[in-house]
Image (tube, rainbow, N blue to C red):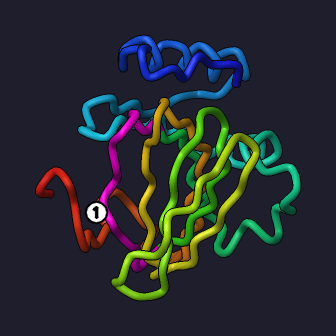
Amino acid sequence: MNLNTSNLIDKKVIFEQIEAELKKENFTVVKKDETRPWGGFFVIDEDQAAVFAAKYFPHLEMDIIKITNKLSPKILVVAPNKRLSWQYHFRRAEIWKIVAGIVGVKTSPTDEEGEIQQLTPEDFIQMDKGERHRLIGLDSWGIVAEIWQHTDSENPSDEEDIVRLQDDFGR
């Protein structure tokens, strides 16, 4: 994505830029949420998971990505100087690739927050089911391609599958 991620760009503009880029790539957005206090996200049609993976994760083979037969592709948008909750999931693993901007990421196998890693465009990170993690906006907007790897085919993950250990917004 060729985006202006300057911290001077307002939320409406960055979401419009991302939506235009996704449309240009022929991705179908099935849900957009720009109401999150940390930024928001775009959910891409699950039927396009293989195409999404090929575009954003070309170094990974689909056999490796697919834990079950269900994958959920998203684009995360994190605002400058905002943090998602320190969290983990019972029914999914996640793969992230930084698309634009520079972000911070913390991970840990325990409830204790790990050191912040600074990730730049093209960097990739994978979190296992249960691994604690947090996405952090630094000095600019951060755009992250994400794939949820559903680990329970009988009970796929959803937005309720979040255990928040700490949250700046009291959720």
Q: Position of residue 73 (x, y in %)?
A: 59, 47
Between 171 and 45, the one nearer to me in the picture: 171
Examine the residues drawn in magenta and state their main secondary structure: loop
- Name the element at disc 1: loop
Q: Quadrant of the N terminus?
A: top right
Look at the image and tell me in which quarter the C terminus lies: bottom left
Placement of 119 over or under 52, stated as above or below: below
Query: x and y percent of residue 137 in the render?
Result: 43, 42
- Image height of 91 relative to 49, above or below: below
Q: Position of 164 compared to 41: left or right?
A: left
Q: As drawn, is 24 to the left or to the right of 154?
A: right
Whether residue 45 is visible, yes or no, is no
Which is more toward the observer, 163 or 85? 85
Residue 10 is one of the magenta-drawn residues: no
Residue 52 lies left or right of residue 45; in this view the side is right
Residue 85 lies in the magenta-colored region = yes
Q: Residue furthest bottom?
A: 110
Q: Residue at x 28, y 62 (%)?
A: 160
Give the residue pinned by disc 1: 160
Residue at 40% of width from left, 74% of height from top? 89
x%, y% of residue 138?
A: 46, 41
Q: How many marks?
A: 1
Please tell me in which quadrant of the rendered image residue 94 appears: bottom right
| Amino acid type, callout 1 | Glu
- Where on the picture, by quarter, is residue 96? bottom right
| 10 versus 76 height, above or below | above
Q: Which residues are magenta?
A: 77-91
User: Residue at (50%, 63%) from the top-left corner?
Assistant: 116
Query: Residue shown at 43%/11% (left/top)?
Result: 13
Res 157 quadrant in image: bottom left
Q: Nearer the viewer, residue 69 or 22?
A: 22
Q: Residues within 10 Å of mark 1 (few under 14, many from 20)?
A: few
